[in-house]
Amino acid sequence: MDKEKSQRHGKLFLILGPSGSGKGTVLRYLREKYPNAVFPLSCTTRQPREGEKEGEVYLFVSKSEFKERIAHGDFLEYAIVHGDNYYGTLKESIMKPLQEGKIVIREVDVQGLRSIRELMPDNQLISIFLTVDSWDTLKKRIIARAEISSEELERRRQSFLLEMEWADEVDYVVVNQDGKIEDTFSQLDLILEEAQ
Ligand code: 5GP
C-alpha cells in the first residue's frame, strides 16, 4: 500500500501490552470516553474466552477462514501470536475511518505495530505500551483472572520478559500501577489530546 500522506487525516492509536497489563480495562474506558472514536474488530483463530462475545473485540474464525481472508487481502497486517494462533487487523475497518479523519484505536502485538508502521505516515500513528511495574504484579493479576497451569504461567512469564522490550519501539509507555487506574486513564487522555 502507498503512503498517501496527504490524503489521510485520521489518527491510529495502537495499544500494546502484555496480557494482564490492563488493555481490556483501558479499552473499555476509552470506548466510553471517546464515543466518536472507532474500535475496529480483528480476526483471530483462538477460541473465545469465557465472557468474550463475537464482534466486540474479535471475530473468531477458523484457520481455513483466516487463510481465505489473507488470500482475499482483507488484512492490514496479520501475525501468529504466542506461537499458535493467527490475529489480523481488518484493512477496511481501519483505513476507511482514517480516511474520514476519525480516531481509530486498536490493540495489537509488536508484530502488528511493526507492519503497520511500514504502511502509515509517522504523524498518523501513535503507539502506546501499557505495562506493569514487575512480573509479580502481572502474575497476581493473571492468577486472579482465570485458572492457569504452572506451565502456562511460565510461558506467560517468558512472554512478559520479551514483551517488556516492546517499550523501546513505542511512542509512549504507560505503567498501569495496581490501585492507580485513574492515573492510567489520565495519562491516556493526555496522549490522545496531545495527538489531536
Ligand atoms: P489475546 O488473545 O490475549 O486477546 O491477544 C493476544 C495478543 O494478540 C495481544 O498481544 C494482542 O494485543 C494481540 N492482538 C490482538 N489483535 C491483534 C491483531 O489484529 N493483530 C496483531 N498483530 N496482534 C493482535
Image (tube, helix red, strand yellow):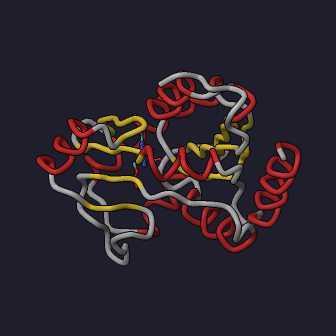
Q: Residue at x 74, y 64 (%)?
A: 181
Q: Nearer the viewer, residue 78 or 15?
A: 78
Q: How many marks?
A: 0
In x, y percent, where is residue 196? 84, 47
Vertical position of residue 56 compared to residue 112: above or below:
below
Q: Residue furthest bottom?
A: 51
The image quarter in which residue 33 lies: bottom right
Q: Residue furthest front?
A: 7
Q: Nearer the viewer, residue 64 or 158?
A: 64
- Left or right of 128? Residue 41 is left
In x, y percent, where is residue 195? 82, 43
In x, y percent, where is residue 160? 48, 38
- Left or right of 23? Residue 35 is right
Q: Nearer the viewer, residue 132 or 113?
A: 113
Q: Nearer the viewer, residue 155 or 185?
A: 185
Q: Residue at x 74, y 36 (%)?
A: 172
In x, y percent, where is residue 63? 15, 48
- Left or right of 196? Residue 154 is left
- Left or right of 135? Residue 193 is right
Q: Residue at x 65, y 23 (%)?
A: 168
Vertical position of residue 71 compared to residue 104: above or below:
above
